[in-house]
């Protein structure tokens, strides 16, 4: 059992045993996250399944950047908006009165645009569901398709939402670390499968490492899923950004996989509108019907006025999206050079939004000390890890976001190399 006193030896007084997180300013950020965790423990109303989750690392590190006036290469969100035509269209939609509940599955126009963007692999009528961001798509999929007590394998390091939703579903998460070379560890995944395993979550291009799963790796995972009769949830929100000529490979399109794969994507990253909270789930009719059943009680429907705008952008702004990918890749090149020059070997960054660097020491201490003192905020990869192997294997890695403006990347480079 947690004891309040144990965490307050740094001088913060704990009135009635509970420190108000908003009043704690003097502590370092990780200690503060632990206090949030402790605070949650004392939140009598919070269900026990959630008490061991701290505040998300993204909120913590963005606040640190603001407090210290540091360049925020932590949280992954772009500072610029998406294509002009799309922004205008959303404004027009509001002006013309598209302000009430959207249809449950989303506007046909957007489902058709998503289907076309996916090369006609899904039927827009029955196999696509518009959600409140990929976040809701992932949550609704897990809650609809995983029974309490079942196991869900996630590849570690993993996006933090997976752990929280698996816990909310009353299921058990089984993290399988990437191998020493940051590649999916197929033998370890095979080993982790038990009769209780219901699903496996993969994410490519990967957050936080930026690796892209190769076709051979996806095929090996598909083989395991078919052998053990597993559902695969494929988080592909960074699908448009492959670097060095790499193309995003989709596990759902491998032979025999459509019927056991739920794929999730989003407008957030591909069109630089993280605030529009609009994503989509693509799967068989049977899976979509089940996921819709849960989704209707989470948010009822998606955001309305942005859907025709996103549909038009998917149809007409593919070149804008490709150009964004090229800009992120250029920033990857610049930041990677600077990190290497500063003596931090880099990994991943084959696609997506992120690069990781080995800082040669405990990454949490580095992020809270040397790095933020220099004026840069990055995220210790340990925030995406819970297994003992992972805690050691990834302890020296820091994630840097590549989606920041050129000026931020340039300023960070100067701070790193000078
Ligand atoms: N999955 C991953 C891997 C992410 O990085 C994010 C954050 N963009 C999401 C899902 C959530 O996407 P959205 O903003 O569309 O809810
Ligand atoms: N996906 C982004 C990241 O990994 C932001 C997610 C968030 O803020 N919840 O940084």
Image (cartoon, rainbow, N blue to C red):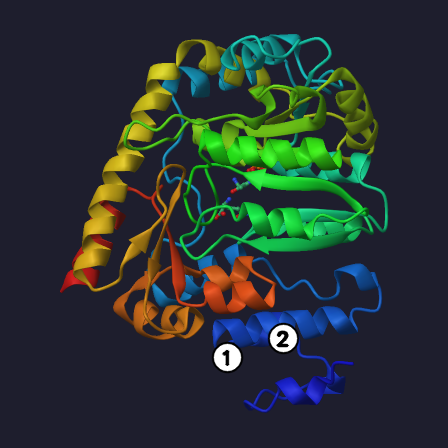
Residue 59 versus residue 286 in the image, above or below: below
**SS at mark 1 in the image:** loop
Left or right of 65? Residue 409 is left
Q: Quadrant of residue 74?
A: bottom left
**Sequence-first tag of 2 and 1:** 1
Query: Who is closer to the viewer here, 367 or 239?
Result: 239
Coordinates of residue 323 in the picture (x, y in percent): 30, 24
Query: Who is closer to the viewer here, 117 or 395?
Result: 395
Left or right of 79? Residue 385 is right
Coordinates of residue 17 in the picture (x, y in percent): 74, 85
Residue at 41% over, 37% down: 352
Query: Who is closer to the viewer here, 340 or 300?
Result: 340
**SS at mark 2 in the image:** helix
Distance of label 2 from label 1 (alpha carbons):
10 Å
Q: Quadrant of residue 325?
A: top left
Coordinates of residue 118 in the picture (x, y in percent): 53, 15
Residue 56 versus residue 267 in the image, above or below: below
If the image is split into quadrants, where does the C terminus sit? bottom left
In this view of the protein, can residue 273 be seen by the observer? no
- Residue assigned mark 1: 27
- Residue assigned mark 2: 35
Whether residues under marks 2 and 1 lie with C-beta atoms below 8 angstroms apart, the answer is yes
Number of marks in picture: 2
Coordinates of residue 180 in the picture (x, y in percent): 43, 57
Ligand 2 closer than 8 Å to the CB at disc 2? no
Q: Residues within 10 Å of mark 2 (few under 14, many from 20)?
A: many
Left or right of 288? Residue 115 is left
Residue at 67% over, 48% down: 153
- Say which mark, if any, is on residue 159: none
In this view of the protein, can residue 204 be seen by the observer? yes
Residue at 58% over, 18% down: 307
If the image is split into quadrants, where does the N terminus sit? bottom right
């Amino acid at each position: 059992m947690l004891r309040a006193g144990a965490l307050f030896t740094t001088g913060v007084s704990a009135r009635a045993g509970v420190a108000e997180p908003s009043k704690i300013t003097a502590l370092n950020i990780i200690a503060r996250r632990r206090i949030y965790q402790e605070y949650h423990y004392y939140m009598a109303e919070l269900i026990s399944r959630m008490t061991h989750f701290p505040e998300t690392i993204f909120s913590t590190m963005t606040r640190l950047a603001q407090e210290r006036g540091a360049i925020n290469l932590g949280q992954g969100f772009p500072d610029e908006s998406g294509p002009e035509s799309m922004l205008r269209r959303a404004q027009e939609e509001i002006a013309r009165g598209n302000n009430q509940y959207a249809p449950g599955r989303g506007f046909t126009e957007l489902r058709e645009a998503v289907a076309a963007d996916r090369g006609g692999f899904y039927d827009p009528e029955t196999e696509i569901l518009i959600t409140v961001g990929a976040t809701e798509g992932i949550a609704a999929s897990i809650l609809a398709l995983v029974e309490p007590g079942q196991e869900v394998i996630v590849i570690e390091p993993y996006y933090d939402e997976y752990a929280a939703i698996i816990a909310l579903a009353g299921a058990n998460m089984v993290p399988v670390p990437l191998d020493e070379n940051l590649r999916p560890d197929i033998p370890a995944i095979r080993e982790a499968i038990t009769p209780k395993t219901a699903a496996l979550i993969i994410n490519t291009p990967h957050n936080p490492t930026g690796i892209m799963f190769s076709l051979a790796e996806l095929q090996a995972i598909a083989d395991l899923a078919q052998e053990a009769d597993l559902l695969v949830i494929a988080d592909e929100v960074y699908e448009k950004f492959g670097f060095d000529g790499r193309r995003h490979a989709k596990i759902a399109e491998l032979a025999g996989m459509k019927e056991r794969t739920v794929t999730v994507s989003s407008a957030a990253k591909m069109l630089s509108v993280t605030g529009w909270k609009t994503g989509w789930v693509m799967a068989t009719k049977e899976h979509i019907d089940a996921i819709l059943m849960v989704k209707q009680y989470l948010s009822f429907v998606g955001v309305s006025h942005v859907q025709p705008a996103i549909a038009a952008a998917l149809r007409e702004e593919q070149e804008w999206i490709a150009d964004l990918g090229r800009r992120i890749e250029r920033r990857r090149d610049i930041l990677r050079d600077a990190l290497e020059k500063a003596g931090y070997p880099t990994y991943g960054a084959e696609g997506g939004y992120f690069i990781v660097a080995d800082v040669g020491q405990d990454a949490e201490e580095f992020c809270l000390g040397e790095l933020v003192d220099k004026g840069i905020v990055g995220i210790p990869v340990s925030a995406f890890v819970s297994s003992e192997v992972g805690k050691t294997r990834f302890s020296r890695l820091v994630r840097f976001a590549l989606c920041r403006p050129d000026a931020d990347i340039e300023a960070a480079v100067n701070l790193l190399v000078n």
